[in-house]
Image (spheres, grey):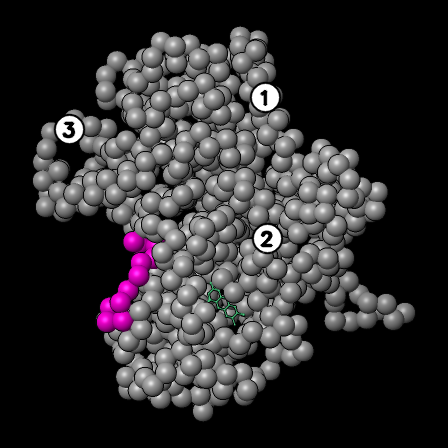
Amino acid sequence: MYPDKKKLSLGQIGLCDVQQLLSVIILQQKSMADTRFYVKVFEADYSAIERINLQLVALQTQYQKGQACQEPAHTDLDSGSCLDKQVAIKQLIDAKLVAIPGCQRLILNQGRCLIDLYLGDIHSSLSNTVAPAYQASYIHAWLHTSDQHSLDEQTLWQMAKLSSNAAMLSSLYMSQQQVNLAQVAGFTLTDISSTDASLKDCLLDARAAEKTSPSPASAQLNDEISQQERQALRQAQANGFQHYPQLPAKEGEIAVIGGGIASTHLALSLAERNKSVRLFCQDEAFSQQASGNKQGAIYPLLTPDNGTLSQYFQQGLLFTRRRLTTLIDEGFNIANELCGVLHTGHDERSRGRINRIISAQAWPKEIAHRVSAQEASNLASIDIDQEGVFYPLGGWISPPDFTQAAFDKASQIADVSALFNCNITRIEQSQGQWYLYQNADAHSKNGSVNEVKHGPFSTLVLANGRGLTQFEQSKLLPATGFRGQVSHIPARNELAKLTTVLCSHGYLTPSNDQLHCTGASYVKDPEHLDYCPNEQLDNLKKMQHSFENKAWVDDIDITGHSARVGVRMVTRDHAPMLGCAPDTHVMLENYQLHQHTKASIKFWKDNPAPIHHGLFILGGLGSRGITTGPLAAEALASQLCGEIIPLDMATLALLNPNRMWMRKLIKGKAL
Ligand SMILES: Cc1cc2nc3c(=O)[nH]c(=O)nc-3n(C[C@H](O)[C@H](O)[C@H](O)COP(=O)(O)OP(=O)(O)OC[C@H]3O[C@@H](n4cnc5c(N)ncnc54)[C@H](O)[C@@H]3O)c2cc1C
């Protein structure tokens, strides 16, 4: 198990040089193994990513040739061994940095070094980041690395909002006026006398300052006005966002109902924060429900405007890939192929839509790019002969392997356990603690049901897939079950040559263990989950329709009647749900008194949204849960632990479980 970890948070304005990131990764690994690093880098220039990626490849080549190790030490990076440096470089290369807007999270050094890379206007990125709930998560030191990003007064105050009282700021590029403004915002300016200023030095200074800094009370006395202004800024942000509450968990064990991707990845993210987690799963093993398919495709759902959901999908895809590659590097067996996904239209309408998406934005090539009919065939290694869009970072993953690996890893590093065959039928809060009730098989003599009670837990998370709405407290959450049958197709003839995931009117995967997957049907509120021959036929027809007159389609043989049926919980806006569980009962009661008027808008905006304290939701992952679930789990873990959540306010609003009501209420619209 990891030792109880301390936290150290560092902010950097400008993604200057990759050596800085590498030195921090090595420092954490080699010298501060008991400390969890949070590094937040804000960069406005999207082309910085390409520069960093080129630097990484060049460095890797040098180290592979042994040249870099022979050079005399002259940078921070040289303080690690040759192997340390190569490991750090490989971690960053494998993490695949891509120039997408918003925050992308990298989890390195076995979960002990988190790097959040925020791309886009720096002031907006800072102001759209919610200040953490716990002081321990404030940023301890800032490094301003580039004269390209001038620190104006507003930006300095937004940095201050996220900073601890004793936070330091190091910069070579500030005018005297900016220095004065930074001091007014409460920063301690540290001397940088050379251009060797590094993140590593800042971290070491910050650690020293933490040890020697005066108590919070006396620090406040020293700098009362700036601290009050910082607090006012945080309060103003919290007040303006209280209709989408972001409360943390209380101390204590965390109970999670679930046994699929969502719950096990939440357990992993919490384990990395040294939390104790108890999973309650109604089945005899993990992945018996939606997360049980043989193969799940991962790729982004893009929209022409690249709006909030589209951005979340890209962040989610990168996070899922990073989790996957890290778990595999750590020795876990997860069947997968990151072979890309080829998206083609199946009629005029869908072709038009794909065309609009790809034309509307300058997507990074790794996210999506247009391919000709010939290129499509080359990528697939079978005759496609249609132009389309290729998502190079996509592919397929075995959801059961991914689920199991997340849990195994979590239980290796922290106190995480699972109770199987444990169907929770009722949850109840008493004196601030949550209790879970499981129906026992036997009935008592007087005919009442015997219940086994689990608890108390200060925090309970519902991550139970299609069961999300089964409890009194969650029954009104707007998510609906859609049955899906995935057909298993023997690999044979031309079809067996398929080398990328095809996505059209349905999807088709390259084979794994001699089977392809194709599907899936989409049936609302299913009456049963039995195999359905009609849906098997429909899955075949979708492929025939998508790839007319292609000889390889004749190789799709459904006569073996092999298939798997699952249910996805789908929200109306197709976004997952994560965050505090809304108290819909109180919300609807209040709605009777406050609706349709300016005063009602004010009421909903000015009062904290009603929630069930200590109860949280991670669900509604829909048809793309493998792509979006792990990041949703990581974001919820950050919230529960009072950290800076790696999603901006627009995304947090989009994913909040109360959004279907609150969006209307704060506009004075009828529910
Ligand atoms: C047919 C189909 C095809 C799909 N294809 C893809 C794809 O290609 N790409 C992609 O990204 N996503 C895909 N998805 C979606 C993805 O599989 C889901 O979004 C994801 O698996 C949901 O994970 P989950 O953990 O939320 O739910 P689940 O995997 O359903 O897990 C819920 C868990 O909760 C437990 N549980 C429920 N109620 C209780 C209770 N009362 N007490 C105790 N335990 C309980 C269950 O036992 C189960 O273990 C597909 C889904 C389906 C159904």
Question: How far across and down, in percent of the image, does residue 185 sit?
Answer: 48, 15
Q: Is residue 414 left or right of residue 552?
A: right
Upstream in sequence: badge 3 or badge 1: 3
Residue 134, located in which quarter of the rendered image? top right
Q: Nearer the viewer, residue 323 or 146?
A: 146
Q: Quadrant of the N terminus?
A: top left
Who's the residue at 23% across and 40% down the image? 51
| Mark 2 residue type | Met
User: Residue farthest to the bottom?
Assistant: 559
Is the CB of the residue bearing disc 3 within 8 angstroms of ligand 1?
Answer: no
Spatial distance from mark 3 to mark 1, Cα to Cα? 44 Å
- Residue 371 belongs to magenta span: yes
Q: Are marks 1 and 2 in contact (CB under 8 Å)?
A: no
Q: Is residue 194 above or below residue 103?
A: above
Q: Is residue 234 above or below residue 36?
A: above
Nearest to the eye among marks 3 and 1: give it.
1
Ligand 1 appears in which quadrant? Answer: bottom right
Q: Nearer the viewer, residue 556 or 661?
A: 661
Circle 3: is it few (<14), some (14-19), or many (20+) Cα within 10 Å? few
Question: How far across and down, in percent of the image, does residue 90 sit?
Answer: 25, 47
Stretch of the chain drawn in magenta: 365-375
Q: Is residue 561 above or below residue 472?
A: below
Circle 1: is it few (<14), some (14-19), or many (20+) Cα within 10 Å? some
- Visible in this render: residue 96? yes
Residue 577's disc number: 2
Residue 73's disc number: 3
Residue 231's disc number: 1
Spatial distance from mark 1 to mark 2, Cα to Cα? 29 Å
| Mark 3 residue type | Ala
Spatial distance from mark 3 to mark 2, Cα to Cα? 49 Å
